Image (cartoon, helix red, strand yellow):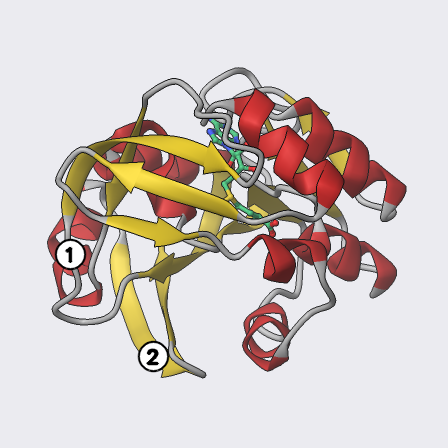
Amino acid sequence: MSVDVYGAALAADASLRAEYDDGYDELLDVQRWLGALDGADERLLARVAGPALDVGCGPGRLAAALTARGIDALGVDIAPEAVALARRRGATVVARSVFESLPDEGSYAHVILADGNIGIGGDPLALLRRCAELLRPAGHIHVEVGAAGARHGAVRARLHGADGRVGAWFRWAHVSAERLGPLAAAAGLTLVETWEDSGRWFADLRT
Ligand SMILES: C[S@@+](CC[C@H](N)C(=O)[O-])C[C@H]1O[C@@H](n2cnc3c(N)ncnc32)[C@H](O)[C@@H]1O
């Protein structure tokens, strides 16, 4: 992501629009990322019982909530403003890419890819393989996907800030609920369950 436009939106609690090169665009949910857990977040976190890695943790609402519940949780994010906000919220975070070397690789019981973060890097199969590598045996990946029938595929994206600034293009991807199974299988993972909660779609993948 273009961390400057993204960081400025987080710092100002301002709106952020993503433009995709397939012609689609959408307002991103900055207020949800900066706000308190909602019901769907709560029910997602209720599934997380052991050491967890929150990939693309942003300003850290999930990682900080897990930490507050006494669950070992580490966030990882490339955006300095997001990392600073997450630390201020009480999350433990490493400021780097999920594709770089991370602490305690192979020991996580849960990897979280919330808020569409299955799109990180623009290659969901490579991301799922990387996440599988980070898990211990019988670990879970909790993925938030698009609705069944929603758009699916790799795109280039760029961010538009409320202040008129436009970031650089970066690789992203959308994964719709019904297209996750084959991707999971190709990554050596089992799709255990897919569910809808409050208009958001989630899946539980297991090693
Ligand atoms: C859709 S936002 C997620 C918001 C976040 N889940 C939250 O709770 O606020 C995507 C996040 O992924 C991060 N990101 C993008 N590429 C990344 C990478 N290669 N490794 C780690 N984080 C990355 C971005 O900086 C951004 O914070």
Q: Is residue 127 left or right of residue 125?
A: right
The residue under the point 64% across, 30% down is: 7
Q: Is residue 63 left or right of residue 191?
A: right
Foreground residue among 153 and 43:
153
The residue carrying mark 1 has its beta carbon less than 8 Å from ligand 1: no
Do residues under tags 2 and 1 come within 8 Å of each other at their CB atoms?
Answer: no
The residue under the point 33% across, 34% down is: 127
The residue under the point 54% across, 77% down is: 40
The residue carrying mark 2 has its beta carbon less than 8 Å from ligand 1: no
The residue under the point 20% across, 60% down is: 176
- Element carrying mark 1: loop
Does residue 80 appear anywhere in the picture? yes
**Separation (CA) of disc 2 from disc 1:** 17 Å
- Element carrying mark 2: strand
> How far from the left and from the top, in percent, is residue 84?
79, 31
Foreground residue among 46 and 90:
90
> How far from the left and from the top, in percent, is residue 25?
28, 48
* Residue 102 in the image: above or below residue 188: above
The number of discs equals: 2
Circle 2: residue type: Trp
Q: Is residue 86 left or right of residue 133?
A: right
Q: Residue furthest front?
A: 164
| Residue linked to disc 1 | 151
Q: Is residue 206 left or right of residue 161?
A: left
- Mark sitting on residue 83: none
| Residue linked to disc 2 | 195
Q: How busy is the neighbourhood of tag 1: few (under 14 within 10 Å), some, or many (20 plus)?
A: some
Which quarter of the figure has residue 124? top left
Which quarter of the figure has residue 197? bottom left
